[in-house]
Image (spheres, rainbow, N blue to C red):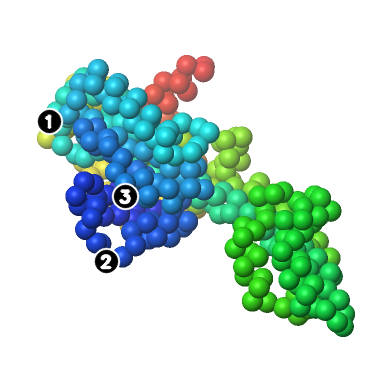
């Protein structure tokens, strides 16, 4: 799967329930979960449709995910083992249980289905399960792009906390006497830390959430000497302000967003692929549908104009060479595709015509089928001496791309 090339999955041991909860794992399970949660871009909580109870260990695990609610998604698995009416009740019960456990202003996204390759046991909700699986796989496929935004947001949080801490240290240093009574003054400041925080917050217009935990912070201050703190340097604070107000916003503008046009999105993605065209693995057979071309192991007959593709065998033969070029998300970037075509030795005008014919969806990238079409046209010119056609014969257009041809023709 092309999705797995860009993400790493970490699977935790199953949650214990009942008497098993008393078994000693040999390590602190919740601390391990918290460590991974801080570093993960997405957290998936899996529930079986016939087993929704939230055990003590699961509750303590969810508790350590506090602060990461925006990363959490839920999967209601094995939902094909119950009928439509039961599924409605189970889905509602799951949301109700999660609402009591996870403190989030928004309802968590729950993917419903049977997430393995075996056929569904109950076909009542086959259409829903197929759409849910597609949504989950698409969210995983675009996760690397979203992680960049998350990392920048985390950096913003850290910079704000560092700035606040610098103001606190600078204030404590400024309040210390120069000669006598340093220890007594330090103890007084520590005891009056709530007022110290309020004074700094009002003076520098800081957010309360940027301040450290007052109890833990006061405890740590007892092991320090305020007189040894460095004095506050406003030029360093200004550097942090510049980073927050200018540098990071400029960096955010370079990342893909929903406001981008297809042209600006492709420019930002460089060697990547448009998020809209991310290929999603699908096993239509388990949903009671035939996968394209699998109804007959020898493919479709030429008389079946809707499904027949003259380059089917070439596609199988060229699959390995396409994968060797390192497609990202299932697509070859314009630069990689250009290098492949240039190596054929054809003239620039000929390659321009071949590109226009092969890039059927006009997104500037080659997927596997478009790559096959391009190689077919190059071979026709080089090996067989045929002229480049003005338009592709219908049998050469991949069935998955024929809708683009119809849309293009409808414009004229």
In depth, the one of 301 and 19 nearer the eye is: 19
Residue located 77% across and 53% down the image: 198
Q: Position of residue 326 (x, y in %)?
A: 38, 55
Left/right of residue 301 with respect to residue 412 in the rendered view = left
Q: Which residue is mark 3?
A: 57
**Structural crowding at the residue carrying mark 2, measured as other residues with C-alpha within 10 Å and reported as few (<14), some (14–19) or many (≥20):** few
| Mark 2 and mark 1 residues within 8 Å of each other at the beta carbon | no
Q: Earlier in the sequence, mark 2 or mark 3?
A: 2
Q: Which mark is residue 296?
A: 1
Residue located 24% across and 52% down the image: 21
In depth, the one of 234 and 371 nearer the eye is: 234
Looking at the rendered structure, the secondary structure element under dot 2 is: loop
Q: Which mark is residue 26?
A: 2
Residue extending farthest right: 178
Looking at the rendered structure, the secondary structure element under dot 1 is: loop
Alpha-carbon span between mark 2 and mark 3: 15 Å
Alpha-carbon span between mark 3 and mark 1: 50 Å
Alpha-carbon span between mark 2 and mark 1: 54 Å
Residue located 29% across and 22% down the image: 89
Is residue 275 placed above or below 191 in the rendered structure? above
Residue located 72% across and 49% down the image: 207
Q: Quadrant of residue 27?
A: bottom left
Q: Earlier in the sequence, mark 2 or mark 1?
A: 2
Residue extending farthest left: 297
């Amino acid at each position: 799967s092309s999705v797995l090339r860009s993400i790493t999955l970490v699977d935790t041991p199953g949650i214990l329930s009942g008497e098993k909860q008393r078994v000693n794992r040999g390590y602190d399970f919740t601390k391990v979960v918290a460590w991974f949660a801080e570093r993960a871009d997405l957290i998936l909580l899996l529930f079986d449709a016939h087993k929704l109870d939230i055990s003590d260990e699961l509750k303590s695990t969810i508790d350590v995910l506090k602060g990461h609610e925006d990363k959490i998604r839920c999967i209601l698995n094995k939902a094909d083992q119950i009928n439509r009416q039961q599924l409605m009740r189970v889905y509602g019960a799951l949301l109700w249980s999660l609402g009591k456990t996870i403190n989030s202003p928004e309802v968590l996204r729950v993917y419903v289905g049977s997430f393995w390759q075996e056929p569904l046991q109950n076909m009542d909700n086959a259409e829903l399960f197929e759409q849910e699986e597609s949504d989950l796989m698409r969210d995983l496929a675009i996760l690397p792009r979203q992680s960049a935004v998350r990392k920048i947001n985390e950096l913003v949080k850290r910079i704000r906390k560092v700035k606040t801490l610098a103001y606190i240290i600078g204030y404590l240093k400024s309040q210390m006497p120069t000669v006598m009574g340093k220890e007594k003054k330090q103890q007084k400041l520590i005891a009056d830390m709530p007022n110290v925080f309020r004074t700094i917050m009002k003076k520098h217009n800081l957010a309360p959430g940027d301040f450290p935990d007052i109890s833990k912070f006061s405890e740590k201050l007892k092991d320090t000497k305020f007189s040894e703190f460095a004095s506050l340097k406003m030029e360093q604070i200004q550097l942090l302000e510049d980073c927050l107000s200018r540098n990071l916003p400029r960096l955010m503008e370079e990342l893909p967003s929903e406001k981008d046009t297809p042209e600006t999105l492709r420019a930002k993605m460089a060697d990547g692929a448009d998020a809209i065209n991310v290929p999603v693995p699908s096993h239509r057979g388990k949903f009671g549908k035939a996968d394209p071309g699998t109804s007959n192991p020898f493919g479709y007959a030429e008389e079946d104009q809707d499904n027949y593709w003259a380059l089917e065998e070439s596609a199988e033969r060229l699959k390995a060479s396409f994968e060797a070029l390192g497609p990202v998300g299932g697509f070859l970037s314009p630069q990689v595709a250009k290098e492949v075509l240039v190596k054929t030795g054809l003239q620039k005008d000929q390659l321009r015509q071949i590109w226009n014919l092969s890039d059927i969806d006009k997104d500037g990238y080659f997927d596997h089928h478009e790559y096959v079409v391009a190689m077919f046209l190059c071979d026709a010119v080089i090996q067989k001496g045929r002229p480049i056609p003005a338009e592709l014969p219908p049998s050469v257009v991949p069935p998955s791309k024929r809708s683009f041809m119809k849309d293009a023709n409808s414009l004229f």
